[in-house]
Amino acid sequence: MKFAILCAAVSLSFSLAAAEYSAADRALAIELLKADGTEQVLDQTFNSALTQMSPKDSDPARPVIERYLKKCFSFEVLKEDLATIYLDNYTVDELKGLIAFYRTPLGRKKAAADPRIGAATAKVTSLKIQENLPLLQRELQKALKK
C-alpha cells in the first residue's frame, strides 16, 4: 500500500511538473528532439532491441515483444517526457538556437555522429572498467579485511 501511495505521489509530481510548460514550448522541445536526431536514435534502439529480443520475424513472441517495446520505448511514448527534460534545461531561446544549429550542415553531421560517438564512448568506458576491475577487487579486499 505504501508503495502504491509513493508511486501515485511521484506520478502526480511528474504530471504537475509537465503541466508548467505551454503547448508551444512543448512543441518547440519536440521539434528539437527531431532536429537533434533523438527520434532516429530511439527508432534505431527500438529496432535493435526488437532484433536482440526476437531475432527471427517468424518468432511467435515477436509481435508481443514489439507491442511491449512500442508501449514503453517508442518516440511517441517518450517524447513528452523528453520534452520536459529539455525544457527543464534550456530556455525557449536556447531551444530555438539549438534547432537552428541542428539545421546547419555541421549540426546534421553532429546529429548523425552522436550515436556512433555514444557507442564508442560506451565501449571505451566498458573496457576501462574491465581493465581496472582487478584494482577494484584488491581495494575491496583491503577494505573488507579492516
Image (cartoon, rainbow, N blue to C red):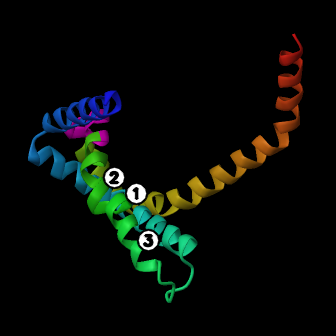
Query: In the picture, which quadrant includes the C terminus?
Result: top right
Magenta stretch holds residue 90: yes
Magenta stretch, residue numbers: 85-94
Q: Is residue 70 left or right of residue 52?
A: left
Residue 63, position in %: x, y? 40, 79
Amino acid type, residue under disc 3 in the picture: Ile
Which residue is denoted by mark 3 in the rendering? Answer: 65
Magenta stretch holds residue 2: no
Amino acid type, residue under disc 2 in the picture: Phe
> Which residue is depicted at the point 14% across and 33% down?
20
Q: Check the image and report above or below for 119 versus 127.
A: below
Query: Which quadrant of the structure image shows residue 137?
Result: top right
- Residue contact at pointers 3 and 1, CB within 8 angstroms: no
Depth check, front residue: 121 or 143: 143
Query: How many numbered badges does the structure rendering display?
Result: 3
**Secondary structure at numbered mark 3:** helix
**Secondary structure at numbered mark 2:** helix
Depth check, front residue: 18 or 88: 18
- Residue contact at pointers 1 and 2, CB within 8 angstroms: yes
Residue 53, position in %: x, y? 54, 70
Distance from Cα at disc 2 to Cα at disc 3: 37 Å
Of the two numbered discs 2 and 3 in the rendering, the one whose residue sits closer to the viewer: 3
Distance from Cα at disc 1 to Cα at disc 2: 5 Å
Query: Which quadrant of the structure image shows residue 4?
Result: top left
Residue 99, position in %: x, y? 28, 52
Q: Residue furthest left?
A: 23
Mark 2 and mark 3 lie on one chain; the one further toward the N terminus is 3
